[in-house]
Image: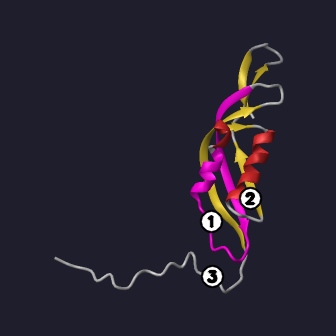
Amino acid sequence: MTTHDHTCPIEDVQSSPDLRSLDIDKVGIKSIRHPVLVKDKTGGAQHTVATFNMYVYLPHNFKGTHMSRFVEILNMNDREISVESFENILREMIKRLEAKSCDVEMTFPYFINKTAPVSGVKSLLDY
């Protein structure tokens, strides 16, 4: 049986100061797929799946960020995405991640009913 001597604890480098004074330009999550409810300007809504890239800019006194908070922020507002809620996502990222600035990229299929000009047949097209 092997026993380990734990008299020397592992150093906590995350909470130690970074003496290099380097800002982190972009740190975050990329290509996370998340269900959303997209609200349009007419009051309609459509369920879809969006792909998010979320980044924050951190000052030199930070070594990193809490990645789980990005997903927590996405879950706000019951997954509803509108112009107003998108702005709230940005504000919440800056506040909760203590960032100087942030970026969010979101892509998703959005379907609109279109009528064919010749046949008159209606069908859904994604944009």
Of residues 46 and 100, which is closer to you in this image? 100
Residue 28 position, x and y percent, is: 64, 61
Q: Quadrant of the N terminus?
A: bottom left
Q: Is residue 4 magenta?
A: no
Q: Earlier in the sequence, mark 1 or mark 2?
A: 1
Residue 94, label in figure: 2
Q: CA distance from mark 1 to mark 3?
A: 15 Å
> Eyeballing the image, is 82 above or below 73?
above
Of residues 82 and 3, which is closer to you in this image? 3
Q: CA distance from mark 1 to mark 2?
A: 11 Å
Q: Please, what secondary structure does the residue beneath circle 1 have?
A: loop
Residue 6 position, x and y percent, is: 32, 81
Residue 56, label in figure: none
Residue 39 quadrant: top right
Residue drawn at the location 59% of the way across and 59% of the way down: 67
The residue at which mark 1 appears reads as 65
Tell me the amino acid under the disc marked 1: Thr
Q: Residues within 10 Å of mark 3 (few under 14, many from 20)?
A: few
Q: Earlier in the sequence, mark 2 or mark 3?
A: 3
Label 1 vs label 3, nearer the camera:
3
The residue at which mark 3 appears reads as 17
Q: Earlier in the sequence, mark 1 or mark 3?
A: 3
Residue 62 position, x and y percent, is: 66, 73
Q: Is residue 93 left or right of residue 71?
A: right
Residue drawn at the location 77% of the way across and 65% of the way down: 100
Tell me the amino acid under the disc marked 3: Pro
Q: Please, what secondary structure does the residue beneath circle 2 have?
A: helix
Q: Which residues are magenta?
A: 45-74
Q: Please, what secondary structure does the residue beneath circle 3 have?
A: loop
> Eyeballing the image, is 120 above or below 29?
above
